[in-house]
Image: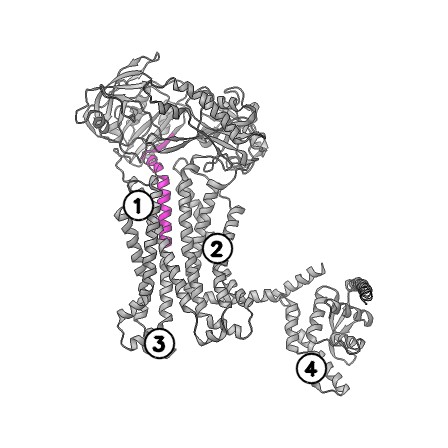
């Protein structure tokens, strides 16, 4: 996985679905990727912690629909700004890559 | 910014946990549960879910790493471990820390001194373009000497010769004066430097307050009664009061007005002396037209576009012209080569960016010698630490192997050992800093001459801090790296089996012990030389009794005081309680004053070296307890051989010492004989010898007894009163001073003692002897600790072998021999090498030794003996331990 893409994926997921707990984020990513992307806990949770340390997401304990205690993560204002920035950068990068790869073929 | 925030939080996380482990585990648990439920729903076995999510333990580890700084965490746990290690080997660690600490402290103190006296650059503009004029001359005993004091007429000629090619400055030699501040009647000692008006502008200094001296303050002789005070004096005497500008003080009868304060950090130009007052050179009015009255150094800054060599050649040309004139007055008998040498003598332009002073010259060599010794002590201490760490590395080979086999990386091991040695070094540098903080001022007090203290700027500035830090870092790296590399290269299998390359280690330990012994013996040897020099000088026969003699220096400017005034004053003092006898003379012996005239005995020629002369009053010999051998003492109406105001000879009488009698008259009795004194070129004055006294030292404690002529004292401005007291002479000083001021109002009286003057002569020797002895004791202690540690460790290591041998019936002597023999050859070899170094060094410093040679039997034997005893004492406890080994117990414990 590209360095930094996990951050972007998590931020985008939270932006789409709103506040979510870790397992829901992983399930969503797996579902969207058609099962190609399977995050283990050792990657997902340190990633979430890093985002939280950078102030992009905020975690808090709450309860799920099945009434279980879970830690929910929500985007902060800074996180939203970061997401917009990263998305732009990503778009630019993919355009460049596509142009480059087409030229190659 | 975001990254910074992450780091801050992680840093905090390393110090205090943010989210608790339980909190993290709770989150992971939910994840696992949900994954398991999903798997169940999909009809997969729970194993699949586990594969999917990864292990909780690994996730926890990754989370913990993200939470804090894993590296910081490992360092802090290494620190805790290192601290435990230090405490576990408490004695060994304490010995290593103390030895390294003392050595680092002593080195730092030595560096601070060297820096303050020799290395520190003056805080002035372009210090590297400042030079001071000087000569490499010869003393009367033919020893090389350096002179850099000049008189004002010479300064004028050199200044004209240099012209616009450079700034030429008068920088007066610091002199202690008594000043009366405001209208006070209590004189205070101050350090005064005369400066020409261009010194402050050329140095590019700005006043802290008021103004500095300018060229317009240096125009009319005696016409500029202004002074600039130093920042230090302003703080010390006036507590930084800004109203100090405009206040006044008097030196002698001359009032001065304070016009400014020099910038902070500028303490004059003479390291070792801290100037209080700067006064225009024009205020030394009497000296301006007096050739031969040398009272300042000449500083030069070549102007841009001129090299210092160009300026030097301009001065050299002037020297040539001056000397052509002087040569005309030489006696016609002067040999030709001497005249040529005199005409071509080279004037030097020495760099003065670090200042120029007498203490600098006197202590340059001693300080470098002591710095060298201290470095050797440091090396001995380093060897101790290296031995300790090596020994620990051997014992810990198994521990290291264990760490490797449970997955510790090479870098992790290196980090562990480095952290341990860093901890050792930090403890040691703390000890060292404390020691240096105490030691440097203590050494300055050793350097100080009583009444003329050496004062140094010893602020703990960045240079000494940087030095300590660099030293500590070097030491850490030196001692950390080797054991760290060795530890990291450990192969688990061989180490756990208990086999290691102990041969290489033993060899290293043996060579370290050898080096320690060599350095130790060298330091002992050198200390012996200096201590013997001090003892010989202190025990040198003086020819007079120096105890309980109070000296009062009286300087009465203006008219020459007739002899009967001085005599009356002396009589008055003689009648006071507590006074045994009193007399007066030109100056006191060993007061760094001398006077010589050539003396002839017809038909013989004058001796190569002219005898010393001293004017003394009646009862001088009695007061000083110099025995009369023949003839009589002076009477008040005796007159000296001299020239009258029209330069006509006036015959007189004199008393000579025994050496004079022997040199000039051989076995004959000189009393009643006449000699010819030659005070000036081709002027012969007859002198009748009326008495002979025993020899006494005059000018230099180091020189042999020289022919000396005492003559009746004449009228004069400046005299020294000698008062022999019944008890402590300084206790009477205040009474004496007030007694003198009854006769001489407003006249400062400097009181000192003859013993003080003698101590002042041996300041350098005392410094060298005291400090080198201290270093020798330190070196001996450290080397002893080192040897003890190594032997003790060897006994513990070979415990099992010793046990078996003893069980098989080996005798105690045999066991001891086995343990000790291994270290015998490095100790012996080290001693021999140290001795050879010492002998070579002794030859180099012969000129500062007194009546002792490096090749004297006792000089060689004493350090060897001391080292042998120390080695024996160090070997004793391990030997006893070896003998006491209980075979049964040892074998059981393995």
Q: Secondary structure at mark 2?
A: helix
Left or right, B165 with respect to B48, comes to left
Q: Nearer the viewer, mark 3 or mark 2?
A: 3
Which-is-in-front pick, marks 3 and 1?
A: 1
Q: Where are the magenta residues, as a range? A: B750-779
Magenta highlight on residue A59: no
Cβ–Cβ under 8 Å for marks 2 and 4: no
Q: Which residue is mark 3?
A: B890
Q: Main secondary structure of the magenta part?
A: helix
Q: Nearer the viewer, mark 4 or mark 1?
A: 1
* Rendering coords of residue B763 (x, y %): 37, 39
- Place residue B123 in its image quadrant: top right
Q: How far apart are labels 4 and 1 at the CA level?
A: 84 Å
Asked if marks 2 and 1 touch (Cβ < 8 Å), the reply is no
Q: Are marks 2 and 4 on the same chain?
A: yes
Q: Earlier in the sequence, mark 2 or mark 1?
A: 2
Q: Are callouts 3 and 4 both on one chain?
A: yes
Q: Badges 3 and 1: C-beta atoms under 8 Å apart?
A: no
Which of marks 2 and 3 precedes in the sequence?
2
């Amino acid at each position: 996985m590209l360095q930094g893409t996990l951050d972007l994926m998590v931020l985008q997921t939270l932006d789409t679905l709103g506040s979510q707990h870790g397992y829901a984020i992983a399930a969503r990513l797996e579902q969207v990727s058609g099962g190609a992307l399977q995050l283990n806990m050792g990657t997902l949770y340190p990633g979430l912690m890093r985002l939280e340390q950078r102030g992009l997401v905020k975690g808090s304990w709450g309860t799920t629909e099945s009434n279980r205690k879970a830690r929910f993560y929500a985007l902060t204002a800074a996180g939203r700004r970061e997401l917009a920035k990263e998305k732009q950068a990503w778009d630019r990068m993919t355009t460049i890559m596509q142009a480059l790869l087409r030229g190659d073929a | 910014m975001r990254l910074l925030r992450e780091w801050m939080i992680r840093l905090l996380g390393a110090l205090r946990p943010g989210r608790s482990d339980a909190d993290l585990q709770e989150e992971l648990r939910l994840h696992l549960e949900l994954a398991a439920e999903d798997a169940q729903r999909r009809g997969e076995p729970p194993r699949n879910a586990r594969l999917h999510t990864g292990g909780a333990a690994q996730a926890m580890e990754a989370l913990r790493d993200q939470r804090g700084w894993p590296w910081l965490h490992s360092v802090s746990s290494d620190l805790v471990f290192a601290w435990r290690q230090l405490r576990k080997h408490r004695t060994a660690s304490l010995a290593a820390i103390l030895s390294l600490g003392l050595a680092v402290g002593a080195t730092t103190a030595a560096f601070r001194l060297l820096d303050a006296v020799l290395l520190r650059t003056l805080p002035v503009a372009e210090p590297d373009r400042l030079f001071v004029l000087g000569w490499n001359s010869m003393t009367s005993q033919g020893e090389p000497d350096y002179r850099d004091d000049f008189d004002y007429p010479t300064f004028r000629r050199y200044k004209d010769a240099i012209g616009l090619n450079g700034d030429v400055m008068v920088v007066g030699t610091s002199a202690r004066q008594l000043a009366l501040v405001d209208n006070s009647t209590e004189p205070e000692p101050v350090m005064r430097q005369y400066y020409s008006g261009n010194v402050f502008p050329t140095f590019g200094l700005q006043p802290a307050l008021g103004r500095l001296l300018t060229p317009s303050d240096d125009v009319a002789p005696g016409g500029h009664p202004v002074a600039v005070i130093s920042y230090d004096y302003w703080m010390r005497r006036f507590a930084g009061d800004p109203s100090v500008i405009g206040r006044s003080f008097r030196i002698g009868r001359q009032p001065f007005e304070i016009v400014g304060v020099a910038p902070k950090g500028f303490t004059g130009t003479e390291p070792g002396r801290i100037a209080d007052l700067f006064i225009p050179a024009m205020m030394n009015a009497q000296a301006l037209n007096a050739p031969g009255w040398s009272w300042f150094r000449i500083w030069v800054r070549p102007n841009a576009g001129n090299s210092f060599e160009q300026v030097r050649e301009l001065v050299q040309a002037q020297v040539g012209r001056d000397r052509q004139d002087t040569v005309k007055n030489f006696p016609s008998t002067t040999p030709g080569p001497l005249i040529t040498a005199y005409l071509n003598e080279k004037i030097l332009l020495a760099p003065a960016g670090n200042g120029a002073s007498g203490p600098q010259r006197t202590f340059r060599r001693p300080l470098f010698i002591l710095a060298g010794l201290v470095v050797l002590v440091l090396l001995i201490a380093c060897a101790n630490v290296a031995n300790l760490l090596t020994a620990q590395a051997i014992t810990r080979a198994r521990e290291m192997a264990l760490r490797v086999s449970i997955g510790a990386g090479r870098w992790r091991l290196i980090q562990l050992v480095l952290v341990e040695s860093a901890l050792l070094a930090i403890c040691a540098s703390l000890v060292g800093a404390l020691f240096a903080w105490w030691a440097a001022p203590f050494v300055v007090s050793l350097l100080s001459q009583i009444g003329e203290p050496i004062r140094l700027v010893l602020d703990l500035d960045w240079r000494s801090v940087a030095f300590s830090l660099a030293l500590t870092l070097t030491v850490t790296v030196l001692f950390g790296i080797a054991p760290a590399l060795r530890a990291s290269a450990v192969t688990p299998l061989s180490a756990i089996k208990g086999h290691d390359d102990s041969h290489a280690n033993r060899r290293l330990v043996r060579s370290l012990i050898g080096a320690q012994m060599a350095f130790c013996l060298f330091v002992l040897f050198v200390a012996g030389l200096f201590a013997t020099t001090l003892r010989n000088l202190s025990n040198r026969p003086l020819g007079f009794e120096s105890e309980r003699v109070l000296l009062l220096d009286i300087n009465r400017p203006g008219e020459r005081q007739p002899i009967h005034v001085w005599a009356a004053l002396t009589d008055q003092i003689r009648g006071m309680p507590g006074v045994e006898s009193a007399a007066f003379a030109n100056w006191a012996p060993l007061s760094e004053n001398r006077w010589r005239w050539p003396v002839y005995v017809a038909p013989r020629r004058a001796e190569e070296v002219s005898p010393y002369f001293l004017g003394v009053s009646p009862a001088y010999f009695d007061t000083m307890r110099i025995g009369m051998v023949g003839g009589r003492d002076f009477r008040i109406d005796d007159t000296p051989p001299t020239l009258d105001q029209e330069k006509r000879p006036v015959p007189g009488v004199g008393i000579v010492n025994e050496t004079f009698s022997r040199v000039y008259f051989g076995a004959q009795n000189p009393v009643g004989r006449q000699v010819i004194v030659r005070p000036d070129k081709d002027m012969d004055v007859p002198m009748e010898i009326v008495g002979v006294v025993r020899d006494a030292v005059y000018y230099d404690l180091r020189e042999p007894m020289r022919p000396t002529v005492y003559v009746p004292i004449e009228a004069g401005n400046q005299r020294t009163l000698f008062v022999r007291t019944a008890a402590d002479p300084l206790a009477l000083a205040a009474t004496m001073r007030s007694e003198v001021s009854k006769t001489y109002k407003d006249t400062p009286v400097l009181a000192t003692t003859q013993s003080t003057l003698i101590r002042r002569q041996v300041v350098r020797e005392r410094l060298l002897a005291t400090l080198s002895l201290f270093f020798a004791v330190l070196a001996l202690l450290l080397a002893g600790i080192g040897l003890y540690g190594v032997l003790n460790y060897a006994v513990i290591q070979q415990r099992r072998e010793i046990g078996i041998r003893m069980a098989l019936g080996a005798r105690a002597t045999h066991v001891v021999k086995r343990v000790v023999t291994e270290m015998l050859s490095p100790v012996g070899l080290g001693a021999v090498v140290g001795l050879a170094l010492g002998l070579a060094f002794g030859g180099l410093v012969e000129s500062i030794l007194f009546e002792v040679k490096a090749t004297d039997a006792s000089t060689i034997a004493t350090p060897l003996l001391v080292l042998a005893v120390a080695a024996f004492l160090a070997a004793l406890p391990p030997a006893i331990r070896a003998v006491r080994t209980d075979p049964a117990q040892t074998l059981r414990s393995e």
